[in-house]
Image: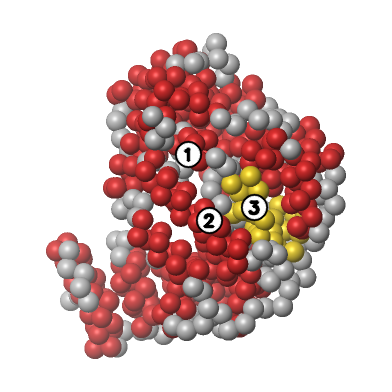
């Protein structure tokens, strides 16, 4: 005779086979009550739902029962992570640790959720505790490399990579070779990075990141063979997955580097068309109405009262991509008073959580909620008096930034539309920049963001400063002195020598910030003027 658990599992499996998921969670919990199932039996049933990828019903069941042990809390955290509630997942996992459950898997799950909340230092620390509790495999060390690169910890990434190599010997998986090529590139070992990338594509022609390295680092004379191989690869493998789309951008960049302008322009158009198809399939196409709603929501934001000034000066570089933000951040970071966070998403994630809750509650954002955001923004004590975040999307949150940090300074990046639009169009941006693969969408986004920056500048003139890329490269001392003055820091002309010992850049601007300030990016679109003038309405 079947046990109650077996009966319920069979019922769940029938529901799943028939695609009948309506009220599945309620039916499961009603069965629990009717048959007086204990905690262990309940979790056994939830595990079945999780094994079938039914994270929402599993979460709904867990939220309706009493969780009495850390296994239940761990399962709750796993479900919360799958539905995107990373903060509550972290809380559940910390409860496991508080209860004395220090199994390695708890640390690994905690690391994963902390990384998604962009608390990367804590994520790296938890992953290290996971490694200490297991006998690491090569794949574990490679995960550590990936995480440390995400956290901009190049030396730590190299250490984990060396451990993976020592363990793998001659059997390093191709994914590990790709990571090593990326690390070598960041370490400025260009020829070694290129050689390894070429070895990788010989093993697996589909791996896009290696092609990206080849497109950047190969000599113009050496690109001919790579172009032929990549053309053949793309002709036989049509798709809109990451590797297929990214390789199209790499091919177009190779054409550009060897002077095949017509082929390059056609290649960039082909790559962006493929990316647009991918966004359609993912239901992430640019939506002008959503952009308008986001803009209005943040312009009209109401708060009970702003907080007191922070004990450091938060600096936010905002605006559009390809406008010189990496250059300005690199120059600012030459000051010993400045800590650079890079493109740190933490404020944006916290802001979206707060605004989502407030949208449901209505009314002004409470002072206490602003205070929570302020306390959570930097997980650890700043190492400088000024902390620079160059996540450009923060342009939508300037009102909230200045409510949370009244002493914050906002640097708004500007650049000519033609150069900015072309520079965006020829780079592969993730879905968060879903406007980037269509010139009409780029124009709409540019117009909206520039109007928003005009609004912030007029509303907060003491906190906001526009910085024009063309002005910076033409008169760097004059323009940068103004920026440093806004921050209350002295400008030193020697900061312009940053490129002599430049730290690695984790953005598209890696090549540019390895050189002295120059105007090569001004009017760069004119190389393609025959194609772009009609697009820009100049003919």
Q: Which residue is at a point 46% across and 42% down the rendered structure image?
A: 429
- The disc label shown at residue 408, or none: none
Quadrant of residue 126 in the image?
Answer: bottom right
Marks 2 and 3: which is nearer the front? 3
Where, quadrant-wise, is the C terminus in this rendering?
top left
Q: How many marks?
A: 3
Q: Which residue is at a point 47% across and 12% down the rendered structure image?
A: 224
The reply to whether residue 251 is visible in this rendering is: no
- Residue 22: give x, y in percent of width and height: 20, 73
**Number of residues whose C-alpha sits closer than 10 Å to that of mark 2, classed few (under 14), some (14–19) or many (20 or more):** some
Q: Does residue 337 lie above or below 273 as drawn? A: below
What residue does disc 3 label? Answer: 466
Q: CA distance from mark 2 to mark 3?
A: 16 Å
First-in-chain label (2 vs 1): 2
**Number of residues whose C-alpha sits closer than 10 Å to that of mark 3, classed few (under 14), some (14–19) or many (20 or more):** some
- Residue 519: give x, y in percent of width and height: 66, 30
The reply to whether residue 428 is visible in this rendering is: yes
Q: Does residue 482 lie above or below 33 as drawn? A: above
Q: Which SS class for mark 1?
A: helix
Quadrant of residue 521 in the image?
Answer: top right
Quadrant of residue 191 in the image?
Answer: top right
Q: Does residue 326 lie above or below 362 as drawn? A: above
Q: Which SS class for mark 3?
A: strand
Q: Nearer the viewer, residue 166 or 477?
A: 477
What residue does disc 2 label? Answer: 393
What residue does disc 1 label? Answer: 421
Q: Which SS class for mark 2?
A: helix
């Amino acid at each position: 005779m079947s046990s109650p658990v077996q009966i319920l599992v069979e019922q769940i499996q029938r529901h799943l086979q028939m695609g009948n998921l309506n009220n599945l969670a309620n039916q499961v919990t009603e069965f629990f009550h009717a048959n007086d199932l204990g905690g262990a039996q309940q979790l056994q049933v939830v595990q079945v739902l999780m094994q079938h990828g039914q994270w929402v019903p599993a979460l709904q069941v867990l939220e309706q029962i009493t969780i009495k042990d850390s296994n239940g809390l761990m399962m709750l955290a796993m479900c919360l992570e799958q539905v995107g509630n990373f903060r509550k997942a972290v809380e559940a996992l910390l409860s496991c640790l508080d209860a004395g459950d220090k199994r390695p898997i708890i640390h690994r799950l905690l690391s994963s959720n902390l990384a998604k909340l962009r608390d990367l230092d804590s994520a790296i620390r938890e992953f290290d505790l996971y490694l200490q509790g297991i006998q690491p495999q090569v794949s574990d060390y490679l995960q550590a490399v990936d995480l440390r690169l995400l956290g901009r910890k190049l030396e730590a990434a190299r250490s984990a990579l060396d451990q993976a190599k020592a363990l793998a010997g001659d059997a390093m998986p191709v994914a590990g070779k790709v990571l090593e090529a990326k690390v070598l590139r960041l370490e400025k070992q260009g020829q070694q990075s290129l050689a390894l990338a070429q070895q990788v594509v010989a093993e697996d022609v589909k791996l896009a990141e290696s092609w990206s390295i080849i497109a950047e680092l190969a000599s113009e004379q050496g690109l001919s063979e790579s172009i032929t191989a990549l053309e053949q690869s793309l002709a036989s493998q049509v798709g809109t997955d990451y590797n297929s789309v990214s390789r199209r951008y790499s091919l177009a960049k190779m054409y550009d580097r060897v002077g095949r302008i017509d082929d390059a322009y056609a290649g960039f158009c082909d790559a962006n068309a493929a990316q647009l198809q991918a966004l359609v399939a993912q239901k992430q196409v640019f939506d002008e109405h959503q952009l308008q709603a986001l803009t209005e929501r943040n312009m009209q934001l109401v708060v009970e009262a702003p907080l007191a000034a922070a004990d450091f000066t938060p600096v936010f570089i905002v605006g559009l991509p390809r406008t010189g933000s990496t250059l300005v951040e690199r120059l600012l970071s030459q000051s010993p008073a400045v800590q650079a966070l890079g493109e740190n998403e933490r404020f944006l994630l916290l802001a979206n959580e707060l605004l989502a809750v407030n949208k449901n509650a209505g009314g002004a954002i409470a002072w206490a909620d602003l205070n929570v955001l302020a306390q959570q923004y930097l997980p650890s004590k700043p190492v400088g008096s000024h902390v620079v975040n160059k996540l450009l999307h923060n342009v939508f949150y300037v009102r909230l930034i200045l409510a949370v940090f009244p002493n914050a300074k906002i640097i708004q990046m500007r650049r000519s539309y033609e150069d900015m639009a072309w520079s965006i169009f020829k780079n592969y941006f993730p879905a968060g920049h879903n406007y980037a693969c269509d010139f009409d969408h780029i124009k709409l986004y540019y117009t909206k963001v520039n109007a928003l920056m005009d609004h912030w500048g007029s509303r907060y003139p003491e906190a906001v400063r526009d910085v024009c890329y063309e002005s910076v490269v033409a008169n760097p001392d004059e323009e940068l002195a103004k920026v440093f003055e806004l921050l209350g820091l002295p400008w030193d002309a020697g900061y312009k020598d940053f490129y002599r010992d430049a730290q690695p850049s984790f953005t598209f601007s890696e090549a540019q910030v390895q050189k002295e300030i120059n105007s090569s990016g001004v009017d760069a679109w004119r190389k393609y003027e025959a194609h772009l003038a009609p697009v820009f309405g100049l003919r």
